[in-house]
Image: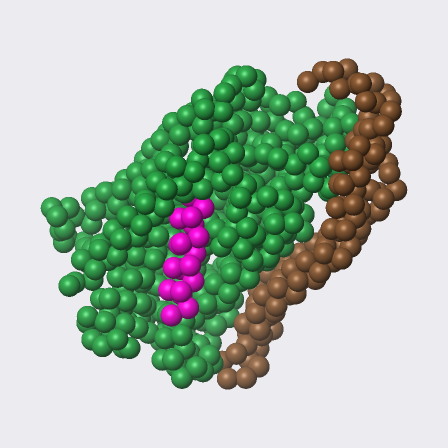
Chain colours: A brown, B green
Amino acid sequence: MSTDAPDRYERIADNPEFAGLRRALRRFVFPMTIAFFSWYALYVILSAYARDFMGTVLFGNINVALVFGLLQFVTTFLIAWLYARYADRKLDPVAEDLNARIQAGEFDADEQPKEVVA
Amino acid sequence: MSARTLTIVLFVVFVLFTLAITIWASRQTKTATDFYAGGRSFSGFSNGMAIGGDYMSAASFLGIAGIIALSGYDGFLYSIGFLVAWLVALLLVAELLRNSGKYTMADVLAFRMRQTPVRVAASISTIVVSIFYLLAQMVGAGALVALLLGIKPGAHFLGMDAGTAKIATIIFIGILMIVYVTVGGMKGTTYVQIVKAFLLMVGAAVMTLLVLAAFKFNLSGLLGEAAAKSGKGAAFLEPGLRYGKEVAGDAAQTFYNKMDLLSLGIALVLGTAGLPHILIRFYTVPNSKAARKSVLWAIGIIGTFYLMTLALGFGAAALVGSEAITAQDKGGNTAAPQLAQVLGERFLGGANGGAAMLAIIAAVAFATILAVVAGLTLASSSSLAHDIYASVIRKGQVSEGSEVRVARISAFAIGAVAIVLAIFAQSLNVAFLVALAFAVAASGNLPAILYSLFWKRFTTAGATAAIYGGLITAVVLVFFSPVVSGSPTAMFPNSDWHWFPLSNPGIISIPVGFLCGWLGTILSREPADPKKYAELEVRSLTGVGAH
């Protein structure tokens, strides 16, 4: 069943346009994940170990802890919006183009009769 | 009309309305795809609402408000963790899962692997996580009913004392969730969740406005009053009253308390993207772009809600007071409805206004619980039917009709187990119980999901090691933690077999899950199949061949 010759999906995976799509996705989501996770971890660690700092009153009864917590909301909304914009511009057009080309049979030219085993 | 009667009337209206939707949905449910994935016909916005309805559970509404009301700022940590967690789902999981899976979480985990071992592991993990979560919801329902029916210790209602009434409620909720799932499938469940999300958002928004109005829209004034009324002063507005407590002269205990806080924090943020009942919601939309839209809507809806938990929690602390709250429920789970009563008395006029608000908010809370338990029951029964029965036992040689029939039977079994277990867990705070479910999901499911999607060399042995390693570590550590025995608030307060010092296992069990997946992979004899990984990558990124 399995041969060493690359099949249709491996040919697509090796295609430069597909490799570009994979790179574009990873280039955004991996650093962004590290960024928001570190930012959140900083908040949790400060809550555990920097109580005096977190308790610093900024004005009225509003302290650093509350503002820091609210900033986590702000960054979450911001990152979600940035990703939506990035995916719209950089990922979707490439994915749609590749999808159309795959559906049109561009990558299965030389193995038409091979799909025997279900 | 008393609050009790009004609540019952409102709740009955909600139940009849949602049952009607469920029956209507059952007429539209013909294929397995209809039953498991609602025909993949929901829009991004509808699914975003349904995700909100599935996610904002009794833990979010009753639990967080209760913790903030009793312990102040520390409850806000839950709101933040529960929200930030959605970035993991948005950036790393939702779209890729939508493109490569069919009905269950296991579809993605088993995509590149040998089917039987991975599906069995994923299914066990799905059921364990869902049962933990179900427990939390049903405990919330029990706490609520005692408040609503005004049953204090020693009092009776319809010949039942408080304990019996709680158990009766748990059984009643259990039966309803089984009906929603078996009759309406994913379509019915989704509509119930959308209606609930709408009701919850409106209810929380009205309460937030009233709380702010009571303090002339001065947030600082609200916080000041909450701090003063709590008797703890400024410390009430800072982290540390409940988690990460510093025990003078006991460095070890202080260290454990800090670790427990970090453990909770990490479990909250990594749990969401491993929750099976959330993951299967991504299958209800037509494509990955709609899956992304639904997460974006969900982040907006859920984020708005969690901001309001500040007003609800501190409002309850300021206007109800911790004494009145703990007198009703030790875990603080009734703070939000008690706040509703006080707000009603103040703004709608007297005892009747209070009774009306209490009734409305309590009915919303019941709706909240029902929608979530239906989602959980659906996730576990889908997994039993699709992963265990159809794929493992029948090796895929099964008709859609009999697969769906097995899913319906499974829903009965899961419901029954959840009812029995919930009766034993009644004194715990529901947000806390849900945090345990998050820890188990983050340890048992998330490592395997991320490795599957992003690591080419990941193997069958790696997948089963990641799931069992994370899952077993998490469950064993919980079992030997102070949550189960050896503390006054434990499930078994009169016994003590605990040796693990933390209440939340995440900080140990999540790394163990990742480590087991890695070790299982590098030690496995059978190499990963590069062709299958190429197929998964191409399908998950381009949407080719998506179901």
Where is the N terminus of chain A found, in terms of image quarters?
A: top right
Task: Name the residue located 79 percent from the left edge and 42 percent from the top edge.
Answer: A98
* Residue reaching furthest to the left: B159
Residue in the foreground of this view, choosing between A34 and B398: B398
Counting from the top left corner in percent of width and height, residue B45 is at 54, 55
Residue B111 x, y percent position in the rendering: 66, 30
Q: Is residue B367 above or below residue B212?
A: above
Residue at 60% in and 32% down = B107
Q: Is residue A68 visible?
A: yes
Q: Is residue B275 magenta?
A: no
Q: Is residue B375 left or right of residue B473?
A: left
- Asked where in the image residue A37 lies, by quadrant, the reply is bottom right
Quarter placement of the C terminus of chain A: top right
Q: Nearer the viewer, residue A111 or B177?
A: A111
| Number of residue marks | 0
Q: From where the camera sits, is residue A46 visible? A: no
Q: Is residue B191 left or right of residue B46?
A: left
Give percent across and percent down for residue B295: 58, 53
Indicate the position of residue B270 as horizontal and vertical percent values.
59, 49
Query: Quarter of the image holding residue B361?
Result: bottom left
Residue B205 colored magenta? yes
Q: Which residues make up the magenta segment?
A: B189-206
Q: Nearer the viewer, residue A24 or B474?
A: A24
Image position of B161 (left or right of B166): left
Instruction: Please name the residue shown 52% across and 22% down the image.
Output: B390
Q: Is residue A2 above or below residue B218?
A: above
Secondary structure mostly seen in magenta is: helix
